[in-house]
Image (spheres, grey):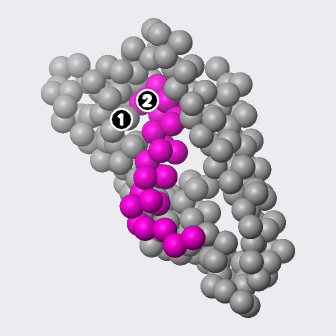
Amino acid sequence: MLLVMSHGARSGLRAAVMTMAGCMSALLCMMSLSAAGLGALLTHFPVVFDALRYLGAAYLAYLGYKLWASTVRRPEASPANADEPMRSGASFFRQGLAVAASNPKAIVFCAAFFPQFIHPDRPALVQFGVLMATFSVIEVSWYLIYALSGHKLSRYLQQTHVIQNFNRVTGGVFVGFAALMAISR
């Protein structure tokens, strides 16, 4: 959510939507893998889960560091997002995909949450489809709220010190999430 908001604030609504599409693609894949039984596999083999968790934490820490250390130019001399080189929609999509895919807890969440709503006497595939569609609508709604909020913030990010503070706070939150991901069980 924070990545979508950050991209909306720093690079505009199109970037946030592409980031959101990447995140949702990864989440849908992870939910499908969970429905196929990978969640049970990760639960029974904690070493694999831990390896994925640490890789995800390292990637979030890297993103946080990049934001924290990013160079900010004077907005009067350049566009509002000049501290970030021109990026394609595909690069925002890939970053959203990588951030969401680097969180193995989504698979475990689905493995723990979805079965509570599955009736064994009915076709499982249809039920998982309904659950995934419902989850997707709710998730996309929240992503849109964060993307629009970030986009609205962009007008306040016209002063160099505000941009720098925004980058540092966002980067610090990413590093904080990385630490929490690394130490949580």
Image-based side of 76 in relation to 138, left or right: right
The numbered mark, 2 or 1, whose residue comes first in the sequence reads 1
Rendered residue at 26%/42% (across/down): 130
Magenta region's main secondary structure?
helix
Residue, far top: 44
Rendered residue at 64%/20% (across/down): 185
Give the magenta-colored segment's residue range.
85-110
Q: Indicate whether 74 appears above or below 86.
A: below
Residue, far left: 123
* Neighbourhood count class around disc 2 (C-alpha, 10 Å): few under 14, some 14–19, many 20 upward: many
Q: Position of residue 61 (x, y in %)?
A: 68, 42
Residue 162: say if magenta. no
Q: Indicate whether 100 appears above or below 137.
A: above
Dot 1 corresponds to which residue?
31
Distance of mark 2 from mark 1, alpha carbons? 6 Å
Dot 2 corresponds to which residue?
107
* Residue 60 appears in the figure: yes
Q: Position of residue 79 (x, y in %)?
A: 63, 85
Q: Quadrant of the N terminus?
A: bottom right
Callout 2–callout 1 Cβ contact below 8 Å:
yes
